[in-house]
Amino acid sequence: MRHVDPQRHRILFGVGLGLILLSFPVGWAGGLGFAAAAAVASGERRWLLVALGVYLASWLIMGLGVLIAGRAGVERAREILRRRRRLREILLHRRQRREDRAGGASTPPD
């Protein structure tokens, strides 16, 4: 089904896709990373509740993004995450090769 206003559809799709992709760092870094670390450091249990609340909020953000962007948005988000993961693997491989070459060149042959 075509949207009545294609420009509005592109904007809504972008917003939905952005919300889907934003939910991952909010959940992991904000919820589990920061608040859980604060709970361990301070020893207060309320930080664990904050961590749980932020993590649940990330799921709500993702759900809202899926509602706005639809199935196409979910597929596009998967593609973006897959490409980012592959790029990280390539960059790690290049870094290791560069370090291996630099390490091998600095040691004198026996």
Image: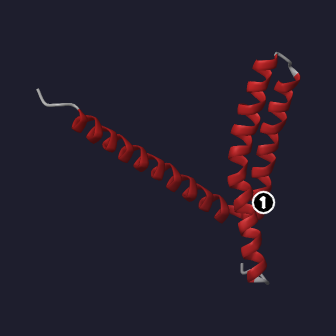
Residue placed at 76% from the left, 19% from the top?
A: 41
The image position of residue 84, as x and y in percent, is 52, 53
Q: Quadrant of residue 109?
A: top left
Work out which quarter of the rendered image holds the N terminus and state it. Answer: bottom right
Q: Residue at x 77, y 70 (%)?
A: 12
Q: What is the count of numbered marks?
A: 1
Image position of 93 (left or right of 102): right
Location of mark 1 (residue): 67
The relative height of residue 5 versus residue 67 in the rendered view (above or below) is below
Quarter-wise, where is residue 77 in the image? bottom right
**Would you call the spot at circle 1 few (<14 residues within 10 Å), some (14-19), or many (20 or more)?**
some
In x, y percent, where is residue 78? Answer: 58, 55
Tell me residue 97's x, y (percent).
31, 43
Q: Residue furthest left?
A: 110
Location of residue 110 (image quadrant): top left
- In this rendering, position of residue 82 left or right of residue 107: right
Secondary element at tag 1 = helix
Residue at 74% from the left image edge and 56% from the top image edge: 19
Residue drawn at x 74%, y 44% is 26
Q: Position of residue 69 (x, y in %)?
A: 73, 64
Name which residue type carries label 1: Leu
